[in-house]
Amino acid sequence: MSSREWEILGVDHVAIAVTPETFDGWRGVWSRLFGGSIFYDIADANPGGVSSMRLCGIKVGNLSIALISGIDRKEKSQVTKYVERHGDHSIQHIAVAVKNIEAFLEETRGKGIGFLGELLLREDAWGGEIKQIFGLPFDGKLHSDEAPFFEFVERPKDSGSFSSGESFSDDFAKRLYEEVEEAARQEHTGVFIAREILEKPTTSAT
Ligand SMILES: [Fe+2]
């Protein structure tokens, strides 16, 4: 029996990396062909920075998609590198919605799960705090700017029902971009789940 105080609720959003050339095309596929509604479109998440990204949030049913493409300046964007490695329209991260994310972090960190930095906090448009953190790459062979990863997020709830994310602020997009760029610059060797835990799941991870 688990005595856990947290819960995985579902997929908050899926971030898909595309090329600048195909961005509008994919945006049209998700909105017009698939019937989604665009709830955010940020042309430049990191204005004036050495690199940046374009970000568009689209909601289709209960699925939230974040389309991203790199903006290269002095440096090549992590998103550009990601698309070069994985191809156009490749899944960069899946954000998992978690109830009681602090308890989730405490328990999973204690069991060796690796996260990038600390919880990011921001005020949500409709009031209340949103909490987000990124997981380290799944495979230690990939550098952090070319590896897919998980994000974990907790959103304020005005009802008991779960709904996927539909809020990306300019400020948050910038911080998020800087945070991941910074992490990508560091030659860290951490992974989301250590090899030893994967090989002995019943003794270490349960
Ligand atoms: Fe995300």
Image (cartoon, grey):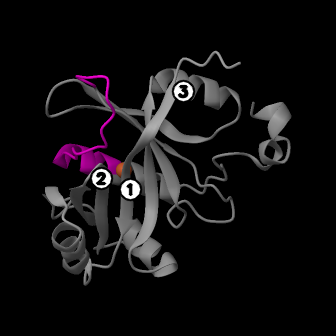
Residue at the (23%, 45%) spot, across then down: 166
Q: Is residue 202 magenta?
A: no
- Earlier in the chain: of badge 3 and badge 1, it is 1
Q: Distance between the residues labelled 2 and 3?
A: 23 Å
Q: Name the residue under label 2.
A: 64
Q: Mark 3 points at which residue?
A: 104
Q: Residue furthest bottom?
A: 21
Instruction: Name the amino acid, label 3.
Output: Phe
- Depth check, front residue: 58 or 129: 58
Residue 140 quadrant: bottom right
Tell me the mark number nearer the camera, choosing from 2 and 3: 2
Residue at the (45%, 62%) spot, across then down: 92
Instruction: Name the amino acid, label 2.
Output: Ser
Residue 80 quadrant: bottom left
- Depth check, front residue: 63 or 193: 63
Q: Residues within 10 Å of mark 1 (few under 14, many from 20)?
A: many
- Depth check, front residue: 39 or 10: 10
* Proximity of marks 1 and 2: CB atoms separated by less than 8 Å: yes
Q: Can residue 178 be seen in this view?
A: no
Disc on res. 14: 1
Q: Where is residue 31 in the image (x, y as percent from the top left)?
A: 18, 67
Q: Position of residue 85 (x, y in %)?
A: 51, 78
Q: Is residue 139 above or below residue 191?
A: below
On screen, residue 129 versus residue 118, left or right, reads: left
Which quarter of the image is occupied by the N terminus?
top right
Mark 2 secondary-structure assignment: strand
Q: Where is residue 40 in the image (x, y as percent from the top left)?
A: 15, 54
Range of the magenta residues?
Answer: 157-176
